[in-house]
Amino acid sequence: MQEKNQLESQISRLKVKCQDSELKGVLLMIEIERLYNIMEEKNKEKESMKERMLELEANNANQLEDFKRGFENMFKSRIVIFFFL
């Protein structure tokens, strides 16, 4: 009789432990999903920032080329004026 009670008590504790483990598993799955969503959001932000940076670099390169052409044209016109004076 005492052995039966001990076994029933042990079974009861194991059931509680099993339920606790299942709950922890569910909580971990929820946390994994939350972290995955954050990661996806950060990856989207990173890609957006990367595209913006590439646009700015291209824009800066174009502005630099425009400035360079303008300077070269100004320099050429001053050379022409210098030779005709």
Image (spheres, grey):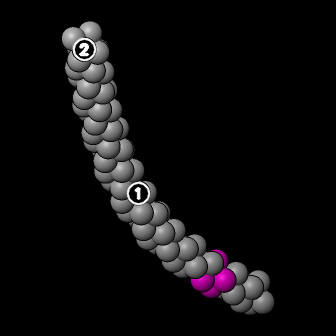
Front tag of 1 and 2: 2
Q: Check disc 2: other Cα within 10 Å, few if <14, some if 14-19, many if 20+.
A: few
Task: Determine whether the residue tagged by mark 2 lies in a helix, strand or loop.
Answer: loop
Using the numbered discs, state the Cα–Cα distance from disc 1 to disc 2 in whole angstroms: 64 Å
Tell me: residue 33, above or below residue 24.
Answer: above
Secondary structure, magenta segment, majority class: helix
Category of crowding for the residue at label 1, using alpha-carbon neighbours closer than 10 angstroms: few (below 14), some (14–19), many (at least 20) = few
Whether residue 35 can be seen here: yes
Based on the displayed image, in which of its 4 quarters is residue 66 positioned?
Answer: top left
Say which of 28 and 59 sits in front: 59
Magenta range? 11-16
Type of amino acid under label 1: Lys
Q: Is residue 39 magenta?
A: no
| Disc ID at residue 85 | 2
Give whichever of 21, 50 is nearer the camera.
Answer: 50
Amino acid type of the residue that numbered disc 2 sits on in the rendered structure: Leu
For the point 60% across and 83% down, the residue is 16
Secondary structure found at label 1: helix
Q: Is residue 23 depicted above or below 36 in this figure?
A: below
- Residue drawn at (66%, 83%) of the image: 13
Position in image of residue 5 (x %, y %):
71, 89
Q: Position of residue 67 (x, y in %)?
A: 29, 32
Image point (28%, 36%), residue name: 63
- What label sits on residue 64 in the rendered view? none
Q: Is residue 40 above or below residue 71?
A: below
The quarter of the picture where residue 30 lies is: bottom left
Query: What mark, if any, has residue 42 been given in the picture?
Result: 1
